[in-house]
Amino acid sequence: MIVDLRRDGNWALVVPTSMGVRITPSGGQPVHSSHAFTMQATSAETNVATIAASLGLPAKVLTCFVKDSPIARFIQSDLRSRNLACEGSEIPQGGPWGCRHQFNIADSGFGARGPHVWNDRAGEVGQSLRTKDFDLDKLFGQEGVQILHMSGLIAALSPETGEFCLALAREAKKHGTRISFDMNYRASFWKGRETELHGIFSQIAGLCDILVGNEEDFQLALGIEGPEQGGQDLGAKIDSFQRMIGRVRAAYPGARVFGTTLRQVVSANEHLWGSVLLAGDEWDVILPRAIPVLDRIGGGDAFVGGMLYGLLKGYDAAQCNRLGWASGALAVTLLTDYAIPADEGQLASIAGGNARVVR
C-alpha cells in the first residue's frame, strides 16, 4: 500500500471549500456576446471529491452558506446529487451589500479562441470559514477520516481560511488522517501577501503525505528551485521535473506521493494530456497524448480526484496515475467542472483509448 490509511473511519475523503456558482454561455459562445447562460455549483475541492463520491466512497464537504439564499439552496441540492455529505454554518447575508457565494463567469472557448474566465469573489461567504464552526475532534477522532484534501485556492482565500486549513491539517495529523494538498498557486490571490502565504503553505506542506502541483506551484508557493528552462524536448523536461521533485522531497520528507499533470494546448478543443506520479520510490509517467476537449475547466481537479480514489482503494502507482489521467480526460468532455464516472470500467476504457459504444 502506498500510504497507510485508517480503516475505522466513517469518511474516505473530507474537503474544506468555499462554494460558488459558475455561469457559462450556451453553445460554446463567448461571455461578452451571449444572452443564454447555464448555472452550475462549483469549487475546486468538490470537483476533486466528486470522483470518489460517485464511485461509492463516503465523502464530506466542510463549508459555509449564506442564510436563506436561493443560491445556497441550489448548491446544497447539487452537492446531494453528487453523493457529497455537507457540513457548514449559515451566515446572515447582512443586506444587499453583505456576503454572498462567489460567481465564476467563464466560457469554454472554441478552436483558436481560448476560454475566458472572470472571477467575481467580492464579499465571498467562504472567507469566514473558522475552526470554531466545526467539531474537529468529533470529525477526525470519533468519526474518522482517511484523507483530508485541501487546495491552495481555499488556503489563500483569506488570512482566516489559511489558518483554518492549517488547523485542519494539524488536527488531521493528530488522528492519523493522511493529508493531501494541491497547491493551485494563483498570482491574484498572492499579490501583496507573499510572505504570509509562503509561511502558511510551507507549514501545511510540512504536514502532508500527498503533494500535487506543477513547476510554478512548487517554485512560487514553496520556494523550491525549479527545473531547468529552455529548449528541452519532452523527455528532458520530465527528467528535469523529476529532479525538482527530489528537492521537494528533501524539503518536505514527510510526503510520500507527488503528482502533476502535463498539458499542452493545441487548440481549445484539443490538448495533449499526460501525468507524472511519484509514490514512495516508484515513478509512473504517462506521456502526453491528444484528447478532445469540450470544456477544459476541472481537468486538473479530476486528475487529483482519480489519483486519490486509487490511493483510497489501495492501488499501485501505475493504477493511481491512470485513474487520475482518465478522470481528467473525462472531465474535459463534460460541461460541468467535475466528472462523475459511471464506474471504474469507464475510466479504464478512457485510459485504454477505447471509445466504442457500450451496450
Image: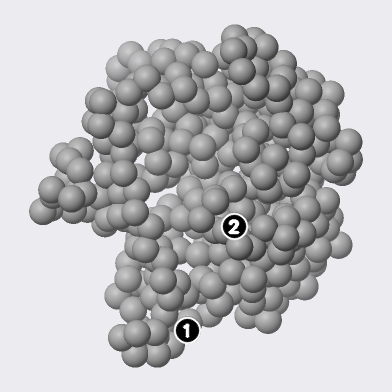
- Per the image, label 1 sits on a secondary structure element best described as strand
For the point 63% across and 45% down, the residue is 182
For image coordinates 39% across by 45% down, the residue present is 337
The residue at which mark 1 appears reads as 91
Out of 108 and 76, give the one closest to the viewer.
Answer: 108
Q: Is residue 248 left or right of residue 43?
A: right
Residue assigned mark 2: 190
Do the residues under discs 2 and 1 have CB atoms within 8 angstroms? no
Query: Which of the 4 quarters of the picture holds residue 195?
Result: bottom right
Seen at 69% across and 54% down, the residue is 148
* SS for callout 2: helix
Residue 102 on image: x %, y %: 39, 66
For mark 2, does the 10 Å Cα neighbourhood hold few (<14), some (14 to 19), or many (20 or more) residues? some
- Please, is residue 263 above or below residue 51 in the view? above
| Residue 152 location (% of width, % of height) | 61, 53
Camera-nearest label, 2 or 1: 2
Q: Visible in this render: residue 340?
A: no
